[in-house]
Amino acid sequence: MNDRRKGVREFMGKRKVTILCSGFGLGFYIPGLLAANGFKKRDIATEVLVFESYLEQDKRDHIADSRKAYHNDFALANFSARMPMDIRGSIDYAQVELLLEAWKAEERYEFISLSGHWGYILDLYREKMLPNPIHVDLLYVDSDLAPSWKSLKKYHPRYDEHYYNACLYDTDKMAIRYEIPVPLGTPLPFESRKRRLVVHGGGWGMGTYQSKVPELVGHNYGLDIVAYDWNEAKPDPDHRYWMNDPEWCAWVKSANGLHEFPPYIEIAGEDTKAYPAEADHHWLFDVASEAMAIVAKPGAGTLIDSLASETPLILLEPFGSHELSNLELWESLGFGIRYEKWREMDFSVDVLKEMHQAIKNRPGERMDYVDHYCSRVTLMKG
């Protein structure tokens, strides 16, 4: 028994969990950083990597064009979400080989992937490490397969054969399995919140959020609107405009060589201010935590913000079938309401309070995903 404990201690001493994100949407990036913080609190080292860093340069250069096109045309974005893509033709394999050799030299054994695009690279590494096994969690932050996972499944149907499927949500039971907390203490009670709504279109500014602003303005709510670019911001005394720093890019490391939360800007005319990135969470979480509701499409990051801050969602048109599944889950749990239904209720504050209470009093153990991971994987290695 003493020898076994010594082995576990030695394993824990050199342990590093590699968290594989994507910059395509902040919902496949921010949760990875939050998980990394969770491991750090448990004295487990991590490295966060972003898939787009390992694309061929010309493919990477076109991402900004896609982002702008999807922002301008939500129907096009939804069409693209239904079209499978074989990402293998876009990967820079020379750069990937250098990465895999570095992992092998460091004896990396633990991985968490938030994007299906990493599946092919993980398979290459698994083969390189044979006969030694690696452990991979495929972390699904939506309640159904997002486009990267659907594409992977189409071209590689048995992609999860050697890996662990870690699902935050159980759609069969309409329940939450695991949560990714945001480290900000106790959520504000509803009575202490400002009569404000956060309005946004996710990390890429997609969807119908802009069209709802004129209607919301007339119902006695202050608005915190996340602008996609400077042209969208029209600040006035009742409505604040915010923006991720447009110079920031998820797959470009910061000056200290790490992937970090985005810096941001509060747009207020002559009083416009730029702020550095927060150390352990996305800045928008602070704004959402003081609001009565979030008006947004049901992306993965928005669900995490809603749970952690106990802020209900006013559900806008989803992006893809995975976000439709998210919408149905939040609606079923009583954590969100479709915008059209809330409008029929004359934008009721009482409805928002009921949903806040539903989130606050949600059943279950509230199992932290990182705790769940550590209990499984430590036992496996020990």
Image (cartoon, grey):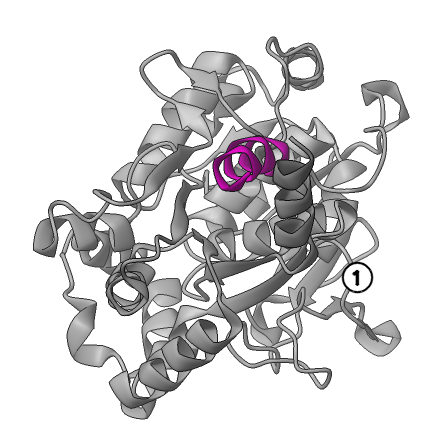
> To which residue does mark 1 refer?
279
Q: Is residue 109 above or below residue 307?
A: below
Magenta stretch, overall SS:
helix
Residue drawn 62% across the image and 46% down it = 7
Q: Nearer the viewer, residue 5 or 230?
A: 5
Q: Where residue 332 sits in the image (x, y, percent)?
A: 43, 13
The one of 107 and 354 positioned closer to us in this rendering: 107
Judged left or right of residue 242, residue 238 is right
Quadrant hosting residue 280 = bottom right
Q: Magenta part of the protein: which range?
A: 370-382
Q: Is residue 154 left or right of residue 5?
A: left
Rendered location of residue 250, percent (x, y): 54, 72
**In the rendered image, is residue 217 in sight?**
no
* Residue in front for this viewpoint, 50 or 198: 50
Q: Residue at x 35, y 37 (%)?
A: 165
Any magenta on residue 279?
A: no
Q: Secondary structure at mark 1?
A: loop
Q: Quadrant of residue 101?
A: bottom left
The answer to whether residue 376 of the structure is visible from this angle is yes
The magenta stretch spans residue 377:
yes
Q: Quadrant of residue 197?
A: top right
> Dot 1: within a 10 Å radius of its alpha carbon, few (fewer than 14), some, or many (20 or more) residues?
few
Decide: is 162 above or below 116.
Answer: above
Going by the numbered disc 1, the residue's amino acid type is Ala
